[in-house]
Amino acid sequence: MKKYLKEIGGGFYSLMLGMRVTLAQFFKPTVTVHYPHESLKMTPRFRGHIELVRDPKTGQAMCFACKVCEKACPSDCIIVEGVKKEGEKRKSVTEFKLDFTKCSLCGSCVEACKSNAIQFSKAYNMVSMNKEDFIMNLFQKLESERSADGQATATPPPEQPKSEVP
Ligand code: SF4
Ligand code: SF4
């Protein structure tokens, strides 16, 4: 009988210990979110796929297709094309392809671009069964976003020979 009561006492004690931890956590701020209905705000240094930066004045891509980032990428995942419009000193980007399947998020391209025309996005919620979904046309993406914002998109460039991401 004594042994039986001792076991009950031990069980009750461990239950109280467990409840103490539960109660302590119950009154602390919530650190989890109801994914996928809610998502976390990414930290400033989070590296999602690269994206083109817009000129705050014009809303257009700051990239002028110098191809420095293309050369700096160790994985050959960037292809940039551009045209020099009449009366303009620099080229305007017309195509910026990223093969994200090969990107290691090393940051060489972002560092190489001295005009700060590319940055890491905060996109982390990416999933697909199709590899093609990760081959992105970042210029087209930027233009679609501009169009959605009600801004005039860039004048369509002259027909360019199609280049494929190697
Ligand atoms: S993103 Fe920067 S480095 Fe790359 S092509 Fe554009 S301007 Fe040049
Ligand atoms: S982060 Fe690195 S691997 Fe990815 S595109 Fe830029 S240079 Fe290439």
Image (cartoon, helix red, strand yellow):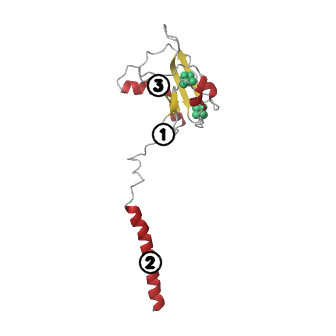
In this view, the residue in front, 32 or 35, is: 32
Q: For mark 2, does the 10 Å Cα neighbourhood hold few (<14), some (14 to 19), or many (20 or more) residues?
A: few
Could you say which quadrant of the image residue 152 lies in?
top left
Q: Amino acid at mark 2?
A: Tyr
First in sequence: mark 3 or mark 2?
2
In this view, the residue in front, 20 or 74, is: 20
Determine contact: label 2, label 1, CB under 8 Å.
no
Residue tagged 1: 44
Badge 3 element: helix
Q: Nearer the viewer, mark 3 or mark 1?
A: 1
Residue 91 percent coordinates (x, y):
53, 15
Residue tagged 2: 13
Q: Amino acid at mark 3?
A: Gln
> Is residue 66 rendered to the left or right of residue 38?
right
Q: Amino acid at mark 1?
A: Pro
- Mark 3 → mark 1, Cα distance in angstroms: 25 Å
Determine contact: label 3, label 2, CB under 8 Å.
no
Could you say which quadrant of the image residue 97 lies in?
top right
